[in-house]
Image (cartoon, rainbow, N blue to C red):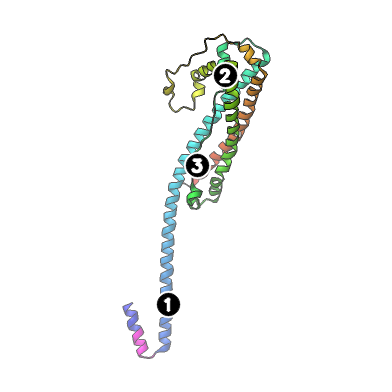
Amino acid sequence: MRLFRAIRSQLMGNERTHRYLFYALGEIILIVLGILIALNINNWNEERKNRIREQVILRQLLEDYTANLDQLNTKIAQRNIIIRSALNLLDIIDNDDNVPRDTIALLLGSLLSDPTFDPIVNDLAATGNLVLISNDTLQRVLSNWTSDVLQVKELEDEWRHVYRHILLPKLFKLGVGRDADHAFWLSSDNLIFLLDHEVVEGLTIGPSMKNIAYQNALNDPELEGIIAHSIAVNQVCNLDSETLRERIRYILDLIKREIQ
């Protein structure tokens, strides 16, 4: 810059106007080029930082959605237990079989489950970090994730209502509630939702000492309807969960492709 000022002063002093104009134009061009280069360097640096942040987010998403998939698989398995047990109970009802009390209690106990999918929810949209995802397809499916989960949760809410406000009161009224609870904790299949199965070791409710007429309980038409409805609700919920499971697998596949 000191050299430029000296040249400019000399040109002005010699009244070489044309040369000065050319010089001034060149100086302006150099300044503009310097600004553009500085902006490009800054933009490149910001883009590099964004890509680093994106990789951090992608790795966290990979961990979160892997956990979501594992949890969803567990909930589907729980519902399958409810469905199988309910089908077996209907078969017993239809054929009027002389089935042992313990077997019926075990099947009723398997209905005492409330599978609820509680996924890790990413807050990318709320924090503004969603724009850091460079893959447009991945960005779109992540933004739609909440609405995808909502449909499954609506069906879960329906079963929760039936389970808490209709099934349980009916079992209590028929006098088989204690046997059902006792059988529930005896079956390892019913405890797949537990992270540590050892926490229930030694937990024994014990069956009822009363002489309960289980055949009369199974002949109750209201209980039969509840059992049939448990199949319908949980089967539809599992069908939607299967769709959600495929969506999670698709998301995981997209994430893995973007991780460097």
Which of labels 1 and 3 is toward the front? 3
Q: Residue at x 45, y 40 (%)?
A: 63
Q: Residue at x 44, y 53 (%)?
A: 51
Label 2 element class: helix
Mark 2: give few (<14), some (14-19) or many (20+) Cα within 10 Å: few
Q: Nearer the viewer, residue 170 or 145?
A: 170
Q: Quadrant of the N terminus?
A: bottom left
Residue 25, placed above or below residue 132: below
The quadrant where residue 41 appears:
bottom left
Determine the residue located farthest toward the bottom in the rendered image: 15
Mark 1: give few (<14), some (14-19) or many (20+) Cα within 10 Å: few
User: In the rendered structure, which segment of residues is drawn in magenta?
Assistant: 8-15
Label 3 element class: loop
Q: CA distance from mark 2 to mark 1?
A: 90 Å
Rendered image: mark on residue 121: 3
Mark 3: give few (<14), some (14-19) or many (20+) Cα within 10 Å: some
> Is 249 one of the magenta-colored residues?
no
Residue 74, placed above or below residue 35: above
Please name the amino acid that badge 3 sits on.
Answer: Val
The residue singled out by tag 2 in the image is 172
The residue singled out by tag 1 in the image is 28
Please name the amino acid that badge 2 sits on.
Answer: Phe
